[in-house]
Every structure is written in structure tokens, then in C-alpha cells.
Image (cartoon, rainbow, N blue to C red):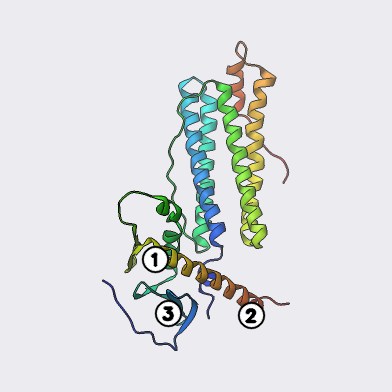
Amino acid sequence: MKDIIRAKCLISSDVEALINQQIKKEAHSSAIYLSMASWCNRNGYDFSADYFFKQSEEERMHQLKFYKYVLDMGGTAISPEITNIKIEYNSFREVFEEALDQEISVTQSIKNIAARCHKEQDYVTLEFLNWFFREQREEEYKARRALELFDVIGEEGTGRWQIDKHVGQINYSAEA
Amino acid sequence: MQQTLPIPSAVFTEVFSTHNGAIYQSDSENCWYIDFAGKLARFDYRNLLKLKKAVYQIDIEDLLLNSTKSADLEIIFICACDHCYVLSLIQIIKLKELLQGTFTMLELNHIIYDRLYRIII
């Protein structure tokens, strides 16, 4: 009897389901960043707004990368429905705190997929995920650094204006 | 709508069967034939997965506990597939059992293939 399922698809249905969840997560992240960009722009933090627009683009790119991977491996990629995106934030700092939370959540979720791949000995998907781990190192660094600015610059006086100016300059250039 | 086809036994391999039905694989056609609820239906790879998803998604416990007067019938309709099933709760449980057994056997077949032909030991 032929092994038809394996001939049609490289990844298991469990890994496929996990990646589809991740696709939704990345799309959700992208939408949240877009909402953060809107809040920052409305409140006069233009550099931060640009920063979040860029982050939103990146998350969208991640989503597509996962999406294409599922399709290339013979699976079914599911275009996600995104709802319940927050519009208002209580403070400038809260925006960045939530941005870091978001990145941590993405990292943890990708780690969970990798754990499943280890269990199934799916080294192909593991190798694919490596790119994302490297990316998450940068994403978390940037989000953490942005929050640090609130501590080192301080929010008093023109503090927030200074923070906003420096957010756009955050850069991660560690040797891989 | 409901077609019944004769089974040319030589071409089919039984994947899994219960008292209530059976699933056969056709290597030449790369598809499966499901003999259940009085008909024989052909499913290709995509449709078999869609059927699995549709059946697994039914909340059997909820249907069992449900005390409303509506009939406990579920219509399993699969997009872009010629077949649909109208099943009672008991039949759903039986179909699920059949599918679970089938996917276990297909997984086993995959492992056997790996061990016999693909992996150099």
C-alpha cells in the first residue's frame, strides 16, 4: 500500500495546525502594531509611530513566510480572521510594555512548535524555524531596549519627547 | 447525488474496517474509498483530510448532553467534494471510530515504509 499522505505533504497535520496558529499570531501581532502606530501618531509620538509601522510590516512578512512554508510543503495554509484589536492605551509606556509582551509571546509560541518538531524528528521544519529564532532575538532586544529608554531617560519634563526621538534609532547588530 | 460503485477487489487495499464500515485505498488512483452509511464514496487526499477535520470537530459530548428537541442529525458537507453525509449521533461516533482507525493505520504504513525502504540502517 502506497504512503500517499507522505507523498502529498512533508509536514504532519499537528505541525501544520501549529504553524497555522502561528500564522494567526503573526497576523494578530501585525494588527496590534498597526494600532499602536495609530495611537502614537495621534498622541504626537511620530518617531514611535514610524517604528510601529515598520514592526507591523515585519510581522506581516513573518506571517507570509510561515504561510508560504505550509503551502510549499503540501499543507493547507489558512488565512486568519483577526478581531479585538485594542485602539486606546493608557500611556506611552504601556504601548511599549505591550509590544514586549507581544514579542515574548511570539518567541514562546515558536519555541513550542520547535518542541513538537523535535518530538516528531521534523528537522526540516526545525531548520526553517531557525530563521525565526534569530529574528526573535532581534525583536525582543528592540522591544526591551525601547522600554529601557523610559528608565534611563525618564518621563519627566521633555523625557517622553526624548524617548520618542530615540525609539527610531534602536538598532540590533549583534554578530550571528 | 448518491452514487454506488462496484468494488473491483484487486485494486483496493483495505486500510481499516469496523462492523459498521470500511475504508479502502486505491494505489492506482491515489485515493480512498469509504464504505459507510450505505454508500461507497471516493475521497482524494484533500477531501479525506477535510472529512477528518469535519468529523473530529463535532462536539459529541455536547450533542449527547443537549436536551433540545431538535433531531440529533448532523450534515457533514465538504466543500468541493461530491459527497455529503447526513448522520445520526450514533453514526457520527461510528464514523469517527472508523476514521481514527484509518489514520492510525496510515501512520503505521508510513512508519513501515520508512523502516523498510527509506531509512538506511
Quarter of the image that includes the N terminus of chain B = bottom left
Front disc: 3 or 1? 1
Q: Are marks 2 and 3 on the same chain?
A: yes
Question: Judging from the image, what secondary structure is the residue with disc 3 in?
Answer: loop
Whichever of labels 1 and 2 marks the residue nearer the N terminus, that label is: 1
On screen, residue A150 versus residue B52, left or right, reads right
Q: Which mark is residue B29?
A: 3
Q: Which residue carries the number 1 mark?
A: B91
Three-letter amino acid code at the position of disc 1 = Gln
Q: Earlier in the sequence, mark 2 or mark 3?
A: 3
Q: Amino acid at mark 2?
A: Tyr
* x and y, in percent, of residue B84 in the image: 33, 66
Is disc 2 in contact with disc 3, using a CB cutoff of under 8 Å?
no
Residue sitting farthest toward the left: B1
- Of residues A171 and B118, the one nearer the viewer is B118
For the residues marked 2 and 3, what is the alpha-carbon distance in whole angstroms?
Answer: 22 Å
* Percent position of residue B106, x then y: 54, 72
Please, is residue A138 above or below residue B6 in the view? above
